[in-house]
Amino acid sequence: MRHWLTLLILTFAGPVLAQDDTSPIVRSSLEQNTAIPGQPLIYRISVLVPTWLPSLPVFPSIEVPNVAVRLPPRASGPISDTIDGETWSGVARSYRLYPMTVGRFEIPAGLLKVTYADPQTSQPVVVDAQTEAFEIIGKLPQGADTLKPFLAARKLTLDRTIDGLTNELRAGDSLSLSTSVSVSGVLPMFVPPLTPDETVSGLVFYPKEPVLEEGENRGIVEGIRSEEVTVMLENAGSYRIGEFSMSWYNLESGKFETSTVPAIEFDVAGTVPANEPVSESFNTRSLLSGVLAIMVVAAFFVLFIKVYGHPLLRWIKNRLNGYKLSEFHAYRMLRHSVRSRDYPGTLMAIAGWKERIGRHCASLDMTSVDDTLYALGKSQFENSSNHGSNRKNEAWKLVLNSVSKLRQQARIEQRKKLGSSLKALNPT
């Protein structure tokens, strides 16, 4: 009984500002604080004023690690209430908070900026208000400890198709393997990866970035996660891509279910290259001719080194030093650090690259690179999870993309400067 009272009466409401009887009233409420990972908790913030709102309040942005936040359709709407016999009007906003994993998550206090008409002068008055901090809990249903990764949904449909599968496949051909999961009652971001985690000798898998589509049907979230893999057929033979299964918790029946797509078998024609060594017959005369040719080449090489060795080495050294100081070398070091997921090395490489590219194009706006670098740093300190890992990978890609776009912009500006510096061929 106490547990249900806690779920139904977990409401923290009341005026945040109490300067006088006409100050705005801010209320926040949470009907329950515990949910299955991937299921929403509805958090509501209400703002009431004695007059009217010339502009909508600036509601807080909620960002908490391992908590997904969504605004439902028509998240904000007008409200009214009777305060001391007077009708107050205002607006309310609803948030959907999704715990992504099991655990307790602290939602910090949020700052609101409210603009309302002064009751005496009708002039706009801007005040700041603050919501209270609270806690939400992600909890697995009974018996779900062995379900890893955990996924709960109302409905789930697993599908897999393969394009290019024929009876005349040959080594060097490719196939396109597409796997998709349609879910209802949960966001597609909670669906685990679908790429086959297997190694098949003679086949090479090249996965593409997953595609997520979100939607809503009669107040219930739904979506699709799709993944496509290009399968390269390296050698001839008979192949089998194993079946793929996904276990999930059915929210409607309260039972655990498993969806499976069957294995795929096919044959690849062609010849397997032989690995036998090839022997060549030779006689003493051909051997002596080869040795003599090598000695002549060696003599010319020694003579060349004596005459041109030191100038050549000095020229190579100067070229190498110039290359190490170039923007291109700095960009290659940066790209290597990003692909190696070396965060400290990336910070140093970006600093060196920005300094060198700035010599040629001092007017470049580095804001886009700084923004992606900030997002990368933020992702490094998130808890490790499927969603956190995807966010880190996306942050690394955005850093490299922003640098590549800035290099392209620098080339365009350099071409413009070069074109403007050339004199007209037919002056008038």
Image (cartoon, rainbow, N blue to C red):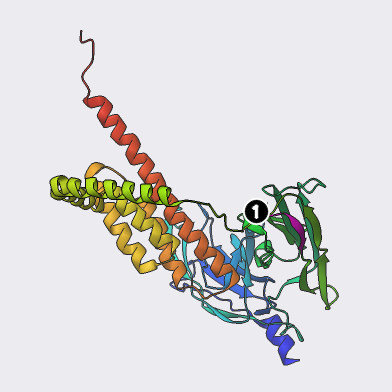
Number of numbered labels in the structure image: 1
Q: Does residue 420 appear anywhere in the picture?
A: yes
Residue 233 percent location from the top left of the image = 68, 53
Extreme-right residue of the structure: 253
Query: Looking at the picture, does residue 302 appear above or below residue 222?
Result: above
The image quadrant of residue 376 is bottom left
Quarter of the image that includes the N terminus: bottom right
- In the image, 53: left or right of 223? left
Residue pictured at 77% horizontal, 66% vertical: 242
The image quadrant of residue 238 is bottom right
Q: Viewer-proximal residue, 329 or 380?
A: 329
282 is within the stretch colored magenta = no
Q: Main secondary structure of the magenta part?
A: strand
Extreme-top residue of the structure: 428
234 is within the stretch colored magenta = yes
Residue pictured at 53% horizontal, 64% vertical: 391
Q: Viewer-proximal residue, 321 or 72?
A: 321
- In the image, 401: left or right of 358? right
Span highlighted in magenta in the image = 229-241
Residue pictured at 36% horizontal, 57% vertical: 334
Residue 65 percent location from the top left of the image = 52, 73
Q: Which residue is mark 1?
A: 273
Quarter of the image that includes the C terminus: top left
Q: Viewer-proximal residue, 319 or 417?
A: 319
Q: Could you classify mark 1 by the number of other residues whose Cα lies within 10 Å: few (under 14), some (14-19), or many (20 or more)? A: few
Query: Looking at the picture, does residue 351 appear above or below residue 132?
Result: above
Residue type marked 1: Pro
